[in-house]
Amino acid sequence: MNHRTLGDSDVEVSEVGFGAWVVGTDWWGDRTRSDAIEMIHHAIEEGITYFDTGDVYGHGESEEVLSEALADYRDEVTVATKVGYDFYNNPQAGHGELPKEMSGEWIRSATEKSLDRLDMEYVDVLQLHNANVEEVDADVLEALDELREEGLVRSIGWALGPSIGWLAEGDMAIEEEFDSLQLVWNLFEQEVGNHFLDTIEQTGSSTSLIPRVPHSSGLLNEQVTPETGHDLDDHRGFRPDAWYETGWEKVDALRFLERDGERTMGQAAIAYLLTYDEVASVTPTFHTKEDITEWAAASEVPKLSDEEMARVADLYADNFGVDRDDGMDELRSSVGGEDIRAAGIDKRATSGPRNSASSD
C-alpha cells in the first residue's frame, strides 16, 4: 500500500481508505458489530491505514465501532471524522437529512463528543459535514484553527454532500486552504472532480482531494446489474432502470482499462483517480473482506497511462456512446456553475472569511 500526505499537513493517508459509513449504520445493509470489527481488522491487514467516519453515522455508533476496532492500532492508523449534524436533538427519519449546526461552539462541542466516543486524544482529520458556504463563517474557521492549535485535531477537511454539485463549497474549501476535500468522483461522474482540479491549479492551493463512490454505487465494480439492482437492501434498490442499463453500457466501453487482466474493473476505477497527484486517498464502499482485498490492491496496480486518460476523457465527452438519459438528473445539483453564482462568492483565494478576517 502506498501513502500520500494531506495538503500542507503532516497527516499521512493510505491511497485506499476505509469509509466507515458501512459500519454502525444500515445504509449499505445490516452487519453485526463483530462482523464490522472483523472487516476493519482485515483492512489493516491489507495495508489500509486511513479510516473515515462521521459523528452522525449510526448516531455515534460508527465512531464507537472504530474505537473498539482500532484500540490496539492507534499509532498505526489515520482517523478522520465529520461534524455538523444535530442528531442529539432530532430523531432520524429513515435516511432523511437531519438539521445541521455549524457554529464555532457546536463544532467544538461535537468534536469533543466524537473524541469521547472514539476514545482518542485527537483525530487526524476533522471534516465539516455537508456544510454550505453561508454556514462557514469566520467563527467556524476560528474554531477549527483553535482545535488544531490545541492538538485536538491534526488537519482540517470539508466533506461535500452526496449530490454531484456543491461547487461553491468545494471552491471555498480549496481557497481557504483546507487540508482535504471529500467529494463524489468517479469515471461516470467527472465534472466536479475536474472542476476542483482546475480550482487547485488556478489558486495554487495545496488542498488534497479525497474521492468517494469511486465505483458509482456498484456499477464500476460490477456488483450491480440491471437484473439484480432492485433486489438490493439499500438505497440503490430504488434507482430507475435506466441507471442500471446505461451504466452497464458505459462499463463495457471501459473494458480496455482492465488491460487483459492486469487490473480488475474495480481496481481500474480507483487507479483512475489515483492517477491525479491532487488525490490523496480514495474511499470505496466495502461490503465484504473480498472487496477489501481486491480494492486495497488498487494502490499497487499501474496508474492509467496518458493514452488511457485521454481515451477516458474522450469517452466521457461522448457520454460513453450512450444516447439516452440515466434517469438520475432530478437527484443531481448543478455542475454548471449556477450554485457558485447563487452563493455570491468570488472565486479567488483572497476572498474567503479566513483571509478577510486576517486582513482586518
Image: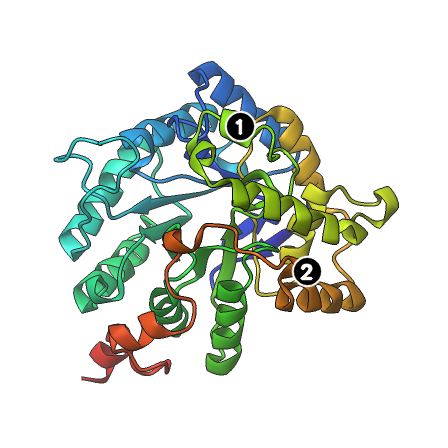
Residue on which the image places disc 2: 321
Q: Quadrant of the C terminus?
A: bottom left
Residue 71, compared with residue 311, is above or below; it is above
Q: Position of residue 206 (x, y in %)?
A: 49, 70
Q: Position of residue 99 (x, y in %)?
A: 18, 45
Question: Front-most of 347 and 259?
Answer: 259
How busy is the neighbourhood of tag 2: few (under 14 within 10 Å), some, or many (20 plus)?
A: few
Q: Position of residue 226 (x, y in %)?
A: 60, 35
* Residue 37 location (% of width, % of height): 49, 21
The front one of 237 and 350 is 237
* Quadrant in which the N terminus appears: top right
Q: Is residue 187 above or below residue 86?
A: below
> Circles 2 and 1: CB distance less than 8 Å?
no
Classed neighbour count for the residue bearing mark 1: other residues with Cα under 10 Å, few (<14), some (14–19), many (≥20): many
Q: Secondary structure at mark 1?
A: helix
Q: Which mark is residue 40?
A: 1
Residue at left offset 62%, top offset 34%: 225
- Disc 2 residue type (three-letter): Gly
Secondary structure of the residue carrying numbered label 2: helix
Residue 211, compared with residue 355, is above or below; it is above
Q: Which mark is residue 82?
A: none
Residue at the (52%, 51%) spot, across then down:
326
- Ranked by sequence position, the earlier of labels 2 and 1 is 1
